[in-house]
Image (cartoon, grey):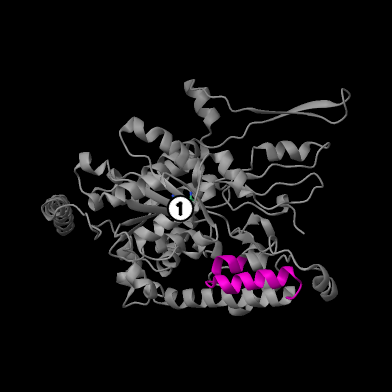
Amino acid sequence: MATVSDVPDEPGQPPALTALSLAEISQESKTKEQVITPFDVSGGVDEHGKAVAIDYDKLIDHFGSQRIDKSMLERFERLTGKPPHRLLRRGLVFSHRDLNLILDKYEKGIPFFLYTGRGPSSGSMHVGHSVPFEFTKFVGTPSTCTQRVTANKSNRRYLQDAFNVPLIIMLTDDEKFLHSPKLSLKDCRKFALENALDIIAIGFDPAKTFIFADTEFIYGGHGAAFGYNILEIGKKTTNNQIKGTFGFNDTYVVFFWHTTHYDVNWSVTYQVNSNNILEFAFPATQSATSFATSFPFIFGSNTKIVSKIPCLIPCAIDQDPYFRQCRDNAPRLGLVKPALIHTVFLPSLRGSESKMSASDTESSIYLSDTDNQIKKKIGKAFSGGQDTRELQEQIGGRTAVDVPFQYLTFFLESDEDLESMRERYEKGQMQSGEMKAAATKELQAYVAAFRERRKAVTTEIRDEFMRPRQLVFKSMPPEKEQVAMLEERRKVLQKELASIDGDLERLQRSGQA
Ligand code: TRP
């Protein structure tokens, strides 16, 4: 079985400078703490050197977030008018920050907006990436229209208004570029556009959803060439260079003391991890999307009102550190702290101690995989079953570590079927091959439905999703304000157009001369 360190990080992730590295060089103890950061996700290792599954309860305590309990589920159901999503029912959406405050406000008629994102580190997304997006779609899907979740072209516009709130999806191609020694800016920009097609195919409503890629929306436009150079030069500039040149300071040399034998051999290693200056700055970029004031074309230009619109961020738990620091700083700007709702990771095919990783084809089922590839991959997935049929009948299998069973908990809708499989497997009445067959069927169906929707997503549709524009939702800015903003924008563009015409005319005239 693969150990934690066999599983490569996603491209663009710096090496973990954590207790993990410390434990790796210690010979006395084989234990390693689990590591969950935006850049590194791995379960711990026990005293026998065995990889263990990610402990989400521990993570809640460690991060200081709140558990999603039964009363929260009931409240959610009351407000949305539909039964909780299977991810909620099964504790796979398990933790939150201030969700109660968002729901309090919503009940009082104060609307919020949804924000989620994706770091485009590869062209094709895997089924693990689709989990937070599926949940985001659910949060925004109207109770009366659950049957329309299986979106097709004609009904897609009805999706996503359970709360009747807008959704903003951020593609952090700058982040992936800055963090990856291997990826070029061109690669990351291409991945962002490809990923946008996949995300749209999950089934969002274009009238309520704005998708943007950082390199286009932040660094793009007229200043694009300039913006890209900022990214290129920033990626090459280390914090140490800036410190040396300008005398800025911080402390970030990490010392590791390790003794191999008592008082005989001891040594000190230190690592200077030269992150670039823009990696240091990126958390501000990811945070800024949490504030409605970043999007006047959606929320209007009245900052007094807009700065009070709260944000709810569905995300995998590894993104929490970004938003923790965002929440710490927001009140100092007079802005509302974003609320969060956390999902667990879809386990890697290799085992539940790590998540699917886009750069590790053996760990992941891609949304572009064929039925046959899915069958083969699940056939090889880590099983919690016994080695022989007889042993399985005697002892039974372990669903807690059985990857095919874990996948069923994410994708199989029926609670009864899932429970019956759990029971039969654990009692040895079901073989691991049968469990694999059940998971294969469910994932093939999920990916096939996705494939159909994906075929319908054209680049024109993507252009529309990615165009900065007024979204349609319950408390959008008054029509008068919308008209004023559009007219203002029109004036600016007209002026530019006139200048361009003038330049062209001059060139034509001088060409004739
Ligand atoms: N940093 C995230 C990633 O690498 C992308 C992201 C940006 C995101 N904003 C987000 C994810 C908000 C979830 C919610 O995947």
Q: Is residue 354 above or below residue 179?
A: below
Who is closer to the viewer here, 127 or 123?
A: 127
Q: Which residue is mark 1?
A: 71
- Residue 420 falls inside the magenta stretch: yes
Is 430 situated left or right of 62 in this image?
Answer: right
- Magenta region's main secondary structure? helix
Residue at x 48% of width, y 77% of height = 449
Point out residue 435 in the picture as x, y percentages from the top left corner: 68, 74
The quadrant where residue 459 appears: bottom left
Q: Residue 326, image x and y in percent?
A: 42, 38
Quarter containing the C terminus: bottom left
Q: Is residue 203 above or below residue 165?
A: below
Q: How far across and down, in percent of the image, does residue 316 sit?
A: 51, 52
Q: Amino acid at mark 1?
A: Ser
Q: Residue furthest top?
A: 247
* Label 1 CA crowd tier, 10 Å (few <14, some 14–19, many 20+): few
